[in-house]
Image: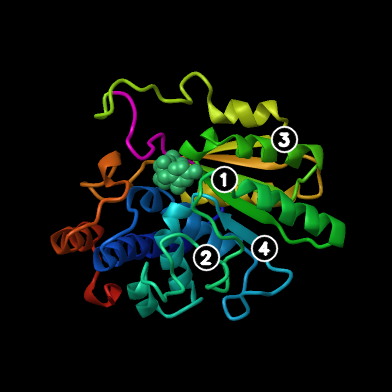
Amino acid sequence: MILSEAERQELERIAKKVRYLILRTVQHSGAGHIGGPLSAVELLVALYFKALRIDPKNPTWEDRDRFILSKGHAAVGLYAVMALRGFFPLEELLTFDKGGSRLQGHPDMTRLPGLDMSSGSLGQGLSPGVGYALGARRLGKDFHTFVLLGDGELQEGMVWEAVHTARRYELGNLTAILDYNGLQQYGWRGAGRGDRKDPWEGLPPARLFAAFDWRVIEIDGHDFDEILAALTLARKEARGPRPTAIVAYTLKGKGLSFTGGKHAWHSKVPSEEDVRRAIEELGLSPEEVPL
Ligand SMILES: Cc1ncc(C[n+]2csc(CCOP(=O)(O)OP(=O)(O)O)c2C)c(N)n1
């Protein structure tokens, strides 16, 4: 066990607040994603509250760890975590997806300090991750680069070019985290779109990363101890030649009875009633529901 009981409880409390903030923000803006952000909550909380070397007061610090949300449609989850971590005021979440806002529907690094890459066009985050990791090696810096991917986006060929390049340049200082919830925008088999097959059936991503000689760690992506153990291990061998892939098994829409495992919530806008129900299910007190 990596965490004390008190630390685990604290992280779980933060995760509940993040889930509420995701629903409230999307309900308020009238647009956004729910399922993908909810499945990545524990991964994002573990990164921003424990694993990443960052300073919210100095978001452009040269020696900070780099984090790229390659599954950029989960931006609202990242913003909720960054707000709670002190990068910007919580109320700013209510500007989400508005024209002049720093919090665009997909991350825009030219607007919000603290973002290391703009993303949203799936498949493009690992390549700049390779760039950061290679840059660190060439400059003799010890920051680590983490990239969060969705399983659907693994269908983009550019991901695999980056997977190959990272091993070819021996980037042990690069870690890809796969939010493997098994659902994409429209789900798969029998999900209302005919009989399309899960593209990874018979081709488990863990095996594919291993085939490129990455170090692969498989975890429960909602278990803070497992997540933090994997992130610690990934950083430990950063001087070595093998990048690390953390394959995190998750549930799309995790945390609420009406969203869990339901691809229909990929980008559905919650009603006020949905938000009220979420607050109740999460067991949040009035002070924990600030917006
Ligand atoms: C290149 C590209 N094609 C399509 C989309 C539209 N889109 C956004 S999210 C998504 C599904 C992504 O599935 P997955 O990577 O598994 O993410 P998650 O289930 O974690 O939300 C699609 C098709 C996009 N953003 N970029």
Identify residue type, mark 1: Ile
Colour approach in the figure? rainbow
Q: Is residue 220 above or below residue 207?
A: below
Residue in front for this viewpoint, 19 or 200: 200
Q: How far is the residue under mark 3 from the one under mark 2?
A: 27 Å
**Of label 4 and label 2, which has the lower sequence position?**
4
Comparing 200 with 106, the one in front is: 106
Q: Residue at left 27%, top 46%? A: 265
Give the mark, 3 or 4, whose residue is nearer the N terminus: 4
Can you identify the residue that label 4 sits on? 65
Q: Secondary structure at mark 3?
A: helix
Q: Determine which residue is flagged by label 2.
A: 108
The amino acid at mark 4 is Asp
Within the image, what quadrant is residue 214 found in?
A: top right
Q: Earlier in the sequence, mark 4 or mark 1?
A: 4
Q: Which residue is mark 3?
A: 164
Q: What's the mark number on residue 83?
A: none
The residue carrying mark 1 is: 177
Residue at figure coordinates x 50%, y 62% from the top left: 107
At mark 4, the secondary structure is loop
Left/right of residue 164 with respect to residue 259 in the rendered view: right
Q: Is residue 182 magenta?
A: yes
The residues colored magenta run: 179-189
The residue carrying pointer 4 sits among few (fewer than 14), some (14 to 19) or many (20 or more) residues within 10 Å by Cα, namely some
- Residue 99 in sight from this viewpoint: yes
